[in-house]
Image (cartoon, helix red, strand yellow):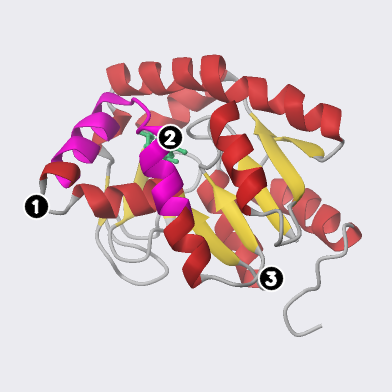
Amino acid sequence: MNIILIGPPGSGKGTQAQKILADFDLAYFSAGDILRDLAKEDSALGKQVAKTINQGKLLSDQLMAQIIRDFLSKNQGSIIFDGYPRNLNQVVFLEESLVNRKGIGLVIYLQVSEQVLTARLSSRVICRNCGAVYNLITNPPREKGICDACGGELYQRNDETPEAVKKRLAIFRQQTRPMIDFFKEKGSLFIVDGNQPIKDIYQLIRKKLIKTGLALIGA
Ligand code: AMP
């Protein structure tokens, strides 16, 4: 069963994805991680991707389609999608791409108020090595600047400046939110209150995934 995680920037998609991956046997597609890797490349495309991300804007649907095609060709099992799709065009493309791969089984929407998001994003740090996400206020690392999980260096993203955050939230409102009604009508939407503590959110998601028939690793 393929799963999509939807939520505004800062809603905790990456954090919940890591927890889901520890319990369930899924491949992980993180649009943001793949694009940030692409942005490091010393090429015209790399530079374009870096610039677009730093402005808080979306990359083209064509580029994203190419990235999805490539990922699907390398991953045969069920997948959890984090950060893709982000607009209705991308939904159509993903549905078509998964037609012979059990389609989209569940869409988890992490609903968080904009006030909470703005506060969270300005205090978010990420591990350069393993991608673990911390919040300096609500979920700080044990040692400043160092990842609890792997000892890697923690950094703040370039697109978490106030202007870029504003842009990202506006894009979510305009382009991503319409997807929510679409999935609601299809009956595949599971809405979770993402203002709760991380572990409480995860318990709700875990229960839902088990109820939907996803097997726990080792069960
Ligand atoms: P994220 O880490 O998911 O917040 O993504 C970081 C940035 O990558 C976004 O602000 C966009 O610039 C770009 N991005 C991520 N996912 C997509 C997507 N599905 N379509 C277009 N651009 C994307």
Magenta part of the chain: 46-68
- In the image, residue 182 lies at what x, y percent? 74, 26
Q: Indicate which disc, 2 or 3, sits on the residue closer to the N terminus.
A: 3
Q: How would you classify the magenta stretch by its main secondary structure?
A: helix
Q: Residues within 10 Å of mark 3 (few under 14, many from 20)?
A: some
| Position of the N terminus by quadrant | bottom right
Q: In the image, what residue type sits under mark 1? A: Asp
- Label 1: which residue? 42
In this figure, which residue is indicated by the disc labeled 3? 23
> What's the residue at 50%, 26% (across, down)?
117
Q: Is residue 103 above or below residue 162?
A: below
Residue in the foreground of this view, choosing between 89 and 35: 89
Nearer to us: label 2 or label 3: 2
Amino acid beneath label 2: Asp
As helix, strand or loop, the secondary structure at mark 2 comes to helix
Q: Does 146 sit above or below residue 93?
A: below
Does residue 66 appear to the left or right of 3 in the view shown?
left
- In the rendered view, tell whether residue 110 sits above or below residue 21: above
Q: Quadrant of the C terminus?
A: bottom right
Residue 22 as seen in the image, left or right of residue 108: left
State the residue position of label 2. 61
Q: Is residue 153 left or right of residue 23?
A: left
Between 152 and 80, the residue placed more toward the observer is: 80
Q: Position of residue 15 (x, y in %)?
A: 54, 52
Q: Quadrant of residue 183?
A: top right
